[in-house]
Structure formats: C-alpha cells, structure tokens
Image (spheres, helix red, strand yellow):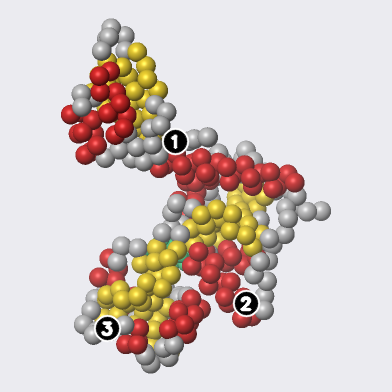
C-alpha cells in the first residue's frame, strides 16, 4: 500500500532550517519540532517531516524515500553530478525557487596572492566540499588542479597548510575576510529550492503539494509586498498615486469631515522608500503608513 502521508525532508539543523520551518508554518502546516525525533507528524495535515543533514535530502527525493525536499541548489547540483558518475538515479523536479538560502560558491585565495585570472590557479591544491561543481568549472576553464575534499571549515585550509586556495559558499564575505582570503571567482549562484520526486504522486498527495505550492507563492509575494495607506489632498491625487509603486488600482475613500482630502489605500509589490515618502509628504500627503502583509491570494 502506498504511504498515505506526504513526506517532506528538511535540514535538521543549519542555515536552511529556520527559514524552512518558518515557511512551512506560514503555509499552515502545524508541526511540533521541539523534539529530537527524526520524523515529526503534522497535527493538522497528512504530512510527515523528516529532519536530516542537508547532504541526504536530494538522495532521499531521488530514491523516492520522501516526496518533497527543501534544499540548497548547490547541494542538489553536487549530488546530481555525483550520482551521474555512480550511475545512480537522479530524476526529480524542482517545483519552486525559494526566497532564502541565497549564496554564491566562490574560489578564494590568500589576500596577498597575485591573482591574474583562473590560469593563476594552475596546479594548485583547492579545498572544497562540493568537488563536482568545482571540477566542472576547472575543466571548462581547462586549468589543471588538485582537489582536497573537506566537509567543514574549508576556510581554514590555506592557513592550516592543507590547500593553496578554497572554493566555498559565501554570502557576505565576512568569513573569508576573517581568514585573510579574497574572493576571486564566483562559479555558482545558489538559492534554496523545493524539489519533488519524479514519479507521479497519488491524486490526493499531488493536490496537497499543489496547495502547498500556492501557499508558498502567497507567502513569498506577500513578503515582497506592502499595504500602503495615506491621506491625500484631492488636488494632488494623480501625482501622489503616480509615486506609489505598482498602484494601478488604488482604493480611494472619503474622509469623514473633509471635503478636500481622501484616504488612499494600495497594495504595492515593492517597499516604499523614505525618499518616496518624503516626496509624498511634499505633495501634501499625510498619515502615511506602510504595513507588512502576512499572506496574499491573488
Ligand atoms: P548539515 O549539517 O545539514 O550537512 P551543512 O553544514 O552542510 O549542514 P549549512 O552551513 O547549514 O550546511 O548550509 C546549508 C545550505 O545553506 C548551504 O548548502 C547553502 O545552500 C545555504 N547557504 C546560504 N548561505 C550560506 C553561507 N553563507 N554559507 C554556507 N551555506 C549557505
Ligand atoms: Mg551538509
């Protein structure tokens, strides 16, 4: 009998965990993750959450052990390449790009290294976790090198004498800087994605997946959007609404006790910056409020 509950793999502890759990919660999936258990059952939906190391997630989806997985593209790409070499199944679908987990996979060298382009890396030893992505880049660049596989603390490898350069995930660059390294090549850009197993799910499970996907859209567009309210003099209404981003359909309401002012409400796809607020004020707008939106369905 096929498993009736939808199985979703998430990273147990790490950079993707908090955002993934927050997103599931925002999508209305109630689950108690305050235990150390590998599998957590949702209280309000037929969903089981598997909490594992991120490296295991693509394989679990590709082997059909779980239906969905929240994962960084870099790990998915690396696992796919590794499995291709090993002749193991790699099929899956990426069903959603997510608005978190942004990072780049970059080569970095000592600050005082005289870097003249990728040819400067010739015959060096490069430490990395994602050896296949690095290999593809170096082969395309036609630069010979030796790779040194490390699963953690890659950034200390040059100082420890294990490698001449590193290839690692970077978001702000602070870790590189703290280790006396400079970023010289960005070889891959990554965000978190939601992946699904390739074999068709039962009708009910697929319906549940579709609902979750719609809700993820709702949460992600809401996060980028703002609800803007202000009072505006009727005489400047046009100039004021022209300043509001994405305000093709503002709601205009009478203000009790005022004949020359109205209230203007608008859902904007962008944030409203201080500069625009100052311009609005200069046009006579007052009581300008910019509110976050929690959920949205268009
Ligand atoms: P695990 O114990 O689950 O194997 P990990 O140490 O391999 O965890 P994390 O450091 O938690 O992985 O990172 C998980 C993912 O977060 C990365 O694979 C990447 O997609 C993403 N990420 C976003 N920003 C960064 C960053 N600055 N450094 C590393 N990873 C980042
Ligand atoms: Mg990992």
Q: Position of residue 40 (x, y in %)?
A: 60, 50
Mark closer to the observer (1, 3) = 3
Secondary structure at badge 2 equals helix
Q: Is residue 31 left or right of residue 250?
A: right
Mark 2–mark 1 Cα distance, whole angstroms, equals 41 Å
Quick one: 6 or 233, which is closer to the camera? 233
Q: Is residue 163 left or right of residue 8?
A: left
Mark 2–mark 3 Cα distance, whole angstroms, equals 33 Å
Q: Is residue 219 above or below residue 251?
A: below
Mark closer to the observer (2, 3) = 3
Q: Residues within 10 Å of mark 1 (few under 14, many from 20)?
A: some
Q: Can residue 249 be spotted in the picture?
A: yes
Residue at image location 34% in from the left, 23% down from the top:
264
Please give the label number shown on residue 84: 2
| Residue tagged 3 | 115
- Name the residue at the top extreme: 257
Ligand 1 closer than 8 Å to the CB at disc 2?
Answer: no
| Residue tagged 1 | 294
Q: Is residue 112 left or right of residue 192?
A: left
Q: Position of residue 101 (x, y in %)?
A: 43, 58
Q: Residues within 10 Å of mark 2 (few under 14, many from 20)?
A: few
Quick one: 227 or 27, which is closer to the camera? 227
Q: Residues within 10 Å of mark 3 (few under 14, many from 20)?
A: some
Q: Position of residue 51 (x, y in %)?
A: 56, 57
């Amino acid at each position: 009998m096929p498993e009736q509950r939808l199985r979703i793999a998430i990273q147990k502890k790490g950079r993707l965990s908090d955002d993934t759990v927050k997103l599931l919660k925002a999508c209305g999936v109630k689950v108690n993750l305050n235990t150390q258990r590998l599998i957590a059952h949702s209280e309000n939906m037929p969903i089981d959450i598997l909490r594992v190391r991120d490296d295991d997630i693509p394989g679990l989806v590709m082997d059909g052990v779980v239906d969905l997985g929240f994962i960084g593209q870099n790990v998915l790409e690396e696992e796919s390449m590794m499995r291709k070499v090993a002749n193991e199944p790699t099929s899956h679908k990426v069903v959603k790009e997510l608005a978190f987990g942004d990072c780049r996979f970059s080569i970095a060298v000592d600050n005082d290294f005289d870097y003249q382009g990728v040819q400067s890396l010739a015959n060096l030893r490069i430490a990395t976790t994602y050896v296949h992505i690095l290999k593809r880049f170096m082969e395309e660049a036609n630069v010979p090198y030796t790779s040194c596989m490390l699963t953690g603390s890659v950034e200390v490898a040059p100082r420890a004498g294990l490698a001449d350069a590193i290839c690692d995930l970077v978001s702000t660059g602070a870790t590189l800087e703290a280790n006396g390294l400079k970023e010289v090549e960005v070889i891959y850009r990554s965000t978190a994605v939601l992946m699904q197993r390739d074999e068709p799910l039962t009708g009910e499970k697929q319906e549940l997946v579709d609902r979750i996907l719609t809700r993820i859209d709702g949460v992600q567009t809401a996060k980028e959007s703002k609800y803007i309210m202000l009072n505006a003099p009727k005489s400047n209404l046009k100039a004021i609404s022209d300043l509001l981003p994405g305000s093709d359909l503002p709601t205009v309401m009478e203000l009790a006790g005022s004949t020359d002012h109205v209230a203007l409400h608008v859902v904007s796809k962008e944030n409203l910056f201080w500069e625009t607020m100052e311009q609005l004020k200069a046009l006579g707008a007052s009581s300008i409020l910019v509110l976050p939106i929690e959920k949205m369905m268009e």
